[in-house]
Amino acid sequence: MVAGGTGTVLASFGRSVLVLGSTGLVRCGLKGRKLRVVCGDRVVWGYPLSADCPSVEAVEPRRNLIERIDSRGRPEPVAANIDRLAVVVAPQPVPDWFLVDRYWAGAVLKDLAALIIVNKNDLGIDGIELQLDEYRKLNLTCIEVSCEAGTGIADLARLLAGSVTLLVGQSGVGKSSLVNAIVPEAAAQTAELTRDAEGRHTTTTARWYQLAPTSAIIDAPGVRDFAPPAHLVRAAERGFIEIHERSVQCRFKDCRHMEEPGCAVRTAVIHQQISTRRYESYRRLFRLYEKLAP
Ligand SMILES: Nc1nc2c(ncn2[C@@H]2O[C@H](COP(=O)(O)OP(=O)(O)OP(=O)(O)O)[C@@H](O)[C@H]2O)c(=O)[nH]1
Ligand SMILES: [Mg+2]
Ligand SMILES: [Zn+2]
C-alpha cells in the first residue's frame, strides 16, 4: 500500500463504493469477495500494490445496521451507523400508515430515535391531521415542512444537527427534495410526480450527505413495503410501544394479543385506549414474523 486512510461510505453500488476520506472523494473497489459494505460504513481503504485503483480493505465494527426484509424474507442492508430514523410522509402520495408503523417499529427495535417529517404542507394537511395526532399522542415527533415553500426547513435542519439521520418513506414524498433543501450543494436527483400521483423511483441507492463533522443525512430509495428483520415473533410487540406497555397487564406472560383470554391489549383496543388501526398494524407484523419464523 502506498496511500489510503479511513473514510465513510457515501454510497455502495455492489462491488464499487464511493468513500469520503480526509482528502476528499475516492471511488474504490472491494478487496476480497466476502467484503460487503453499506452506506454509512466506516472503512479503511488503500492502493494495493498489485492494482492501480484504490480498494476498501476492511470495515470497522458497526454501531448499528438498518436492514429490511426483502421479498424472499431475507435481511437486506439499508444503512449503517445512524442515530435517527426520519419517516417522511406527505398529503400526496396518500400515506401508507402501516408502513410508517413498521419503520417506527424498526427504529424502536434498534434503539434509535424516530420522527415523522410531514412534507408538502403547502398542499394542505387537513386530510392527515387526525393520523398525525395519533402519533403525537404516542410522543412521536411530527414536524411539518414544505420544500416548495421553504417553510420549516431551518427548524428541521437545527433538529437534525449533530447526528446522522436516515430519511425513509414512500416514493415521491420528497426525501431527495428535503436533502436538497437542507444541503444546498447536494443536487440530489428528484422525481416529478406523475399523473396518478405516484412518484417514480429516482433514488436507487442510499446516499450519505455530510452536513458538518458530526451531522449527516442519508437519502434512501422510496419503498412500497418495509419490515424490520426479527429473530423472534415477539419483536412485533416491542415495536409498538403502547402495546408493549400494556402487555404487562395481560393474564398470560407470553400473550400474543390475538385470541387469548384476559388480554389487556385487546381490552384497551375495545375501550379505545389503543387505536384499532395500530392494533391491526401490530397483527399484520406479528403474522409476518410468524410466517417467517423457522
Ligand atoms: N407541492 C410540493 N411538492 C413537493 C415538495 N417537496 C417535493 N415535492 C415534489 O414531489 C416530487 C417527488 O420528490 P422527490 O424528492 O423526488 O421524492 P423522493 O421521496 O425522493 O422519491 P424517491 O426517490 O422515488 O423515493 C417532486 O416532483 C417534487 O418536486 C413540497 O414541499 N411541496
Ligand atoms: Mg429520492
Ligand atoms: Zn395480550
Image (tube, rainbow, N blue to C red):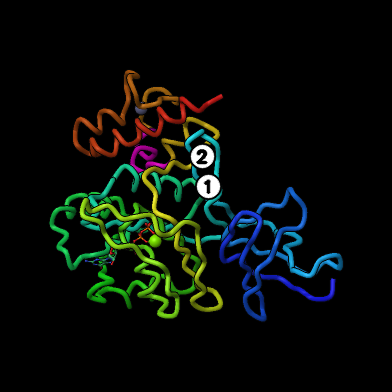
Q: Quadrant of residue 201?
A: bottom left
25 vs 50, nearest the viewer: 50
Q: Do tag 2 and tag 1 residues touch (Cβ < 8 Å)?
A: yes
Of the four image quadrants, the one with ligand 3 is top left
From mark 2 to mark 1, how far is it between C-alphas? 7 Å
Above or below: residue 32 compared with residue 154: above
| Circle 2 SS class | loop
From the top left corner, tell me how far across and down residue 98 is, in percent.
Answer: 31, 42
Residue at the spot 57% in from the left edge and 66% down from the top edge: 10
Position of the C terminus, as image quadrant, is: top right
| Residue 133 seen from this side | no
Residue at the spot 43% in from the left edge and 30% down from the top edge: 288
From the top left corner, tell me how far across and down residue 75 is, in percent.
Answer: 55, 41
| Residue 65 seen from this side | yes
From the top left corner, tell me how far across and down residue 173 is, in percent.
Answer: 30, 58
Kindly identify the amino acid type of the residue bearing the numbered disc 1.
Glu
Q: Earlier in the sequence, mark 2 or mark 1?
A: 1
The kind of secondary structure the magenta stretch mainly shows is: helix
Residue at the spot 22% in from the left edge and 75% down from the top edge: 149
Position of the N terminus, as image quadrant, is: bottom right
Magenta stretch in the rendered image: 239-247
Numbered badge on residue 67: 1
Decide whether residue 246 is among the magenta residues: yes
Residue at the spot of label 2: 229
Residue at the spot 32% in from the left edge and 19% down from the top edge: 259
Kindly identify the amino acid type of the residue bearing the numbered disc 2.
Pro
Q: Quadrant of residue 190?
A: bottom left
| Circle 1 SS class | strand
209 vs 234, nearest the viewer: 209
Q: Quadrant of residue 59?
A: bottom right
Horizontal placement of 185 versus 193: left or right?
A: right
Horizontal placement of 224 versus 15: left or right?
A: left
